[in-house]
Amino acid sequence: MKVDKRCLYEVLGVAKDASQADIKKAYRTLALRCHPDKCPGDENAKANFQSLQRIYAVLGNPKKRKVYDQTGSLADSEELAGEQFDALREYFRTLYKQVTVEDIEALEGEFRGSPEETAELLELHKRFHGDMGKVFEWLLFSDPRQDAHRFADAVRAAVADKRARDYKKFRTWAASVDARPRPKDPLAPRRSSAKEKNKGGGKTGAGDDAALIAQIRDRAAGAAGADGLLASLEARYCGKGARKGAPRGGEPPEEAFADVRARATTAAEPLAFKGAKPARKRAKI
């Protein structure tokens, strides 16, 4: 796949020179909106979500992104070409218009501290063999400053109940966490002042998330231009058997739904768009 009109950046709706942080934000926004749990009647939801994860697995990794920027191709580029690519691009474009700061806040409040968050935490802990740095990179709405002690407690409890392995990397990390004071209220909303930020902003009048949303809307409305904030998000339905065998990102039910987060990692199930040709086996990207 050549880097012209059909590029991974266009699918996310971001500029090619966007920062990794911007890519992460954009991915999170789309991941929450198109997650299969949010699209119960869409038979292609899982395939679309897997495609988004594979795109982020490339753009979210600086080394893989550099190779992609230089070559304009992927190991499995044949699966992101032609009608499949067009369908994916248009599908995500329809989602950009639906994102609001209120949605993000609602989802964060519903997800943090929930059983689903704990399940995702343990799945990622297993996937990354106790490397909590990677867990924080991929787990929805996680922040080491606020959640480290909370996550350490949850994983330790799971280890004690034999629901999780006791990795050396985790023990080392947990020991360093114990040496720090616990936050007074680890579940305190981090985005509750988003509206106030909008009031006090400059001409654009918004915090990072509001600016991201505005830019995504602009691109969805009509622009094929390349300037926009990048995005990034979390790993789910990205392995053999999904929940039953591979970790997924975490999101709550539709009632609280909103936007922002999920993630991707190494190659998983082949992409499966409606009407697409069966994917060939390939090396992990």
Image (tube, rainbow, N blue to C red):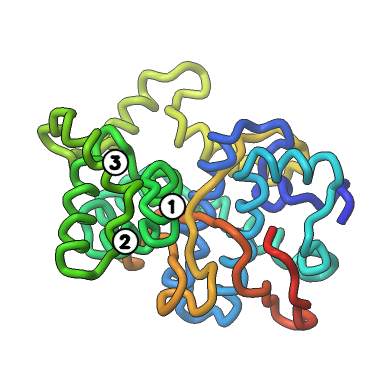
Report the residue that reaches farthest toward the front. Answer: 168
- Name the residue that disc number 1 marks: 259
Q: Disc 2 designates what residue?
A: 122
Report the Cα–Cα distance between label 1 and label 3: 33 Å
> What distance separates the C-alpha of mark 3 from that of mark 2?
17 Å
Q: Identify the mark nearer the N-term, 3 or 2.
A: 2
Task: Give how far across and how far down residue 21 sits, in percent.
Answer: 54, 34
Q: Which of 206 and 267 is in front in this view?
A: 267
Residue closest to the eye, 256 or 47: 47
Mark 1 vs 2, N-terminal side: 2
Neighbour tally class for label 2: few under 14, some 14-19, many 20 plus, Cα within 10 Å? many
Q: In the rendering, at what x and y percent does residue 192 appear?
A: 26, 36
Query: In the rendering, which numbered label is found on residue 172?
Result: 3
Q: What element carries label 3?
A: helix
Q: Residue at x 32, y 45 (%)?
A: 105
Q: Which amino acid does label 1 sit on?
A: Asp
